[in-house]
């Protein structure tokens, strides 16, 4: 077949006109067509976050800090000083009692780094929040892991006995993942026992979920920590303050101990996180609303499990720890298929316990429908 230049031009010309017309009509169709359905976002009930995020005062503080001429282009030293003052004012202590970090994770790690060594072990529960034990492993500190008692609480007596010769005794109160609380009196007695058994050991108390506690037997150990160089209390803005993505945590303690924890200086934080935390610590009304909101959604969820025949611990946090009477993995996988993410395994209890974070009440109403499907149960009428 001969293929002349003229025929080629003609072919291309005709073809391209047809092509353009087809393309125009395809665009027109596309513009008129409804947007393709997006997969709905799963319910995120796996990381113990605040489902609402930070409050309006926090967002406003961040917006103005990031504006033209704001502090974002400067090192954050003055802003950190203001944050420390705001935290100190909130607890009636002095800024020398306060250290901040990139999340409380940084502070927990620093405590392990500074106060333990290959010959000064870490004492921690088994199960508890694993950051300290994980970091101890990394830096070569032996870990004395003490099993929970029968009510799935940290066994303070056994932990105090194990503290002899230790560098740090770590207590998470209330405890992640079991959601259980130890009373203020029990904590006082524990601290005294550790001080007697191990005068050099630091008692590190992680009160990450303090703002969600509703049991009146609870007491923060902050007033004691400011006077006791062997006691440090860690807190975070990641939970009730709703700022997990902004990475701000703090610890309160005796000035001599805080000075040792503060070796990283003020550069661990960024200006957005600092101004957010400063605004949030002053917004006590928002914190109270968040605690009440969580309590209602937590009660709804625990009631549903109870009416469906499943028990759990008495949660004092923004998550619950439920005996689902079957391995966590199968339950988790089936929930994920139906758009709900729940926690990972927590050995040695992964054969029957599941941790579920508390979202909004509406989210929990949707979640229990999924849990009912997966467990093959219907809750009895309320
Ligand atoms: C008990 C406990 N402490 C500390 C943290 C870490 O907090 P941050 O986000 O401040 O590093 C968590 C996070 O889940 C936690 O559960």
Image (tube, rainbow, N blue to C red):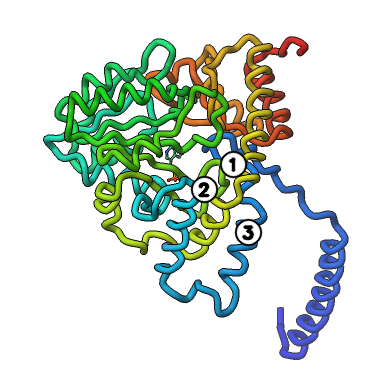
Neighbor class of circle 2 (other Cα within 10 Å; few <14, some 14-19, many 20+) is: many
Measuring 60% from the left and 38% from the top, which residue is drawn there?
Answer: 44
Ligand 1 within 8 A of label 1's CB? Answer: no
Give the image location of residue 285, x and y in percent: 65, 45
Q: Secondary structure at mark 2?
A: helix
Quadrant of image for the N terminus: bottom right
Q: CA distance from mark 1 to mark 2?
A: 8 Å
Label 1 with label 2: CB-CB less than 8 Å = yes
Q: Which residue is located at x 38 percent, y 20 percent?
A: 186
Q: CA distance from mark 1 to mark 3?
A: 15 Å
* Residue 339 in view: no
Who is closer to the viewer here, 331 or 123?
Answer: 123
Residue position marked by numbered label 2 in the rendering: 244
Residue 194 visible? The answer is yes
Mark 3: few/some/many CA within 10 Å (<14, 14-19, 20+) = some
**In the displayed structure image, the side of residue 332 where residue 174 appears, left or right:** left
Using residue 99 as the reference point, say whether residue 12 is left or right of it. Answer: right
Q: Nearer the viewer, mark 1 or mark 3?
A: 3
Q: Which residue is mark 1?
A: 50
Which quarter of the figure has residue 318?
top right
Residue at numbered disc 3: 59
Instruction: Give ligand 1's quarter of the image.
Output: top left
Q: Quadrant of residue 11?
A: bottom right
Separation of marks 3 and 2 at Cα, in angstroms: 14 Å
Q: Is mark 2 within 8 Å of ligand 1?
A: yes
Q: Where 209 falls versus 154 (above or below)?
A: below
């Amino acid at each position: 077949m001969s293929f002349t230049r003229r025929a080629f031009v003609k072919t291309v010309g005709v073809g391209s006109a047809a092509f353009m017309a087809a393309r125009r009509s395809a665009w027109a169709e596309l513009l008129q067509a409804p947007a393709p359905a997006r997969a709905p976002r799963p319910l995120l009930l796996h990381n113990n976050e605040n489902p609402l995020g930070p409050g309006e005062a926090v967002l406003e503080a961040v917006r103005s800090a990031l504006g033209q001429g704001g502090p974002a282009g400067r090192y954050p030293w003055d802003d950190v000083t203001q944050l420390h003052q705001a935290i100190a004012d909130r607890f009636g202590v002095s800024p020398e009692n306060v250290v901040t970090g990139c999340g409380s994770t940084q502070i927990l790690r620093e405590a392990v780094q500074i106060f333990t060594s290959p010959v000064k072990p870490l004492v921690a529960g088994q199960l508890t929040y694993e950051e300290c034990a994980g970091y101890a492993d990394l830096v070569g500190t032996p870990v004395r892991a003490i099993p929970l008692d029968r009510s799935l609480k940290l066994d303070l007596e056994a932990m105090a006995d194990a503290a002899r010769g230790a560098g740090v005794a770590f207590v998470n109160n209330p405890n992640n993942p079991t959601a259980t609380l130890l009373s203020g009196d029990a904590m006082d007695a524990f601290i005294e026992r550790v001080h007697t058994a191990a005068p050099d050991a630091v008692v590190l108390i992680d009160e990450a979920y303090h703002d969600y506690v509703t049991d009146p037997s609870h007491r923060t150990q902050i007033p004691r920590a400011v006077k006791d160089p062997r006691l440090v209390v860690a807190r975070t803005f990641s939970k009730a303050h709703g700022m997990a993505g902004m990475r701000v945590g703090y610890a309160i303690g005796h000035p001599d101990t805080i000075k040792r924890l503060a070796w990283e200086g003020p550069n661990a934080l960024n200006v957005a996180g600092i101004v957010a935390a400063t605004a949030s610590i002053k917004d006590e009304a928002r914190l109270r609303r968040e605690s009440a909101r969580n309590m209602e959604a937590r009660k709804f969820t625990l009631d549903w499990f109870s009416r469906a025949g499943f028990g759990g611990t008495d949660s004092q946090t923004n998550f619950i720890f439920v005996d689902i009477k079957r391995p966590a993995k199968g339950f988790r996988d089936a929930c994920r298929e139906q758009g709900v993410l729940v926690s990972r395994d927590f050995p040695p209890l992964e054969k029957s316990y599941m941790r579920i974070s508390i979202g909004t009440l509406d989210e929990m109403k949707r979640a229990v429908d999924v849990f009912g499907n997966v467990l093959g149960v219907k809750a009895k009428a309320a």
